[in-house]
Image (spheres, rainbow, N blue to C red):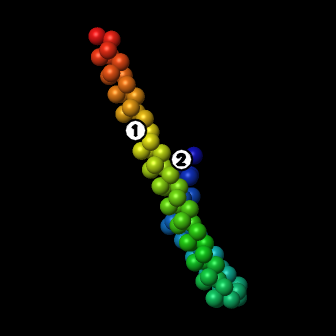
Amino acid sequence: MEVLCRKLSSRKLWTALAGIAAGLALAFGLDQEAVASTAGAVVSVISVVTYIVTEGRIDAAGVKTAIEDVQEAVEEVTSIESD
């Protein structure tokens, strides 16, 4: 599941899909300006969402590390007080 989430959050994947969709839209005769605007908007939104998700994961990892460090410190203080 994590691999799938990582792949779906890839900007390269979404850029490629937007390129394919834009190419197909142009091939079927849609307005070039509308296609370019839509593709640009899709890539921009995906980039922002990917950034937010990535930063959230980094922040979560930082919090987890901080909690582990505090737990280790508490265990050390507790073991010192026990002796």
Determine whether 16 is above or below 23 in the image.
Answer: above
Tag 1: residue type? Answer: Ala
Q: Which mark is residue 53?
A: none
The 10 Å Cα crowd at callout 1, few under 14, some 14 to 19, many 20 or more, is: few
Above or below residue 4? Residue 77 is: above
Position of residue 58 measured from the top left corner of the image (x, y, whole percent): 44, 50
Q: Is residue 59 left or right of residue 23?
A: left
Q: Which residue is mark 2?
A: 2
Real-space Cα distance between discs 1 and 2? 23 Å
C-beta proximity under 8 Å, tags 1 and 2: no
| Residue type at numbered disc 2 | Glu
The crowding category of the residue bearing disc 2, from other C-alpha atoms within 10 Å (few below 14, some 14 to 19, many at least 20), is few
Q: Quadrant of residue 36?
A: bottom right
Residue at screen point 32% across, 14% down = 81
Q: Residue at x 50, y 67 (%)?
A: 12
| Residue 44 as seen in the image, left or right of residue 65 | right
* Camera-nearest residue between 21 and 41: 41
Q: Which numbered circle lies on residue 66?
A: 1
Badge 2 element: helix
* Label 1 element class: helix
Q: Is residue 7 visible?
A: no
Name the residue nearer the viewer: 35 or 60. 60
Relative image position of residue 13 (x, y in whole percent): 54, 65
Residue, x 33% and y 11% (percent of image)?
82
**Mark 1 or mark 2: which comes first in sequence?**
2
The residue shown at (64%, 88%) is 32
Residue 42: image location, x then y, percent? 61, 72
Residue 18's spot in the image, x, y percent?
Answer: 59, 73
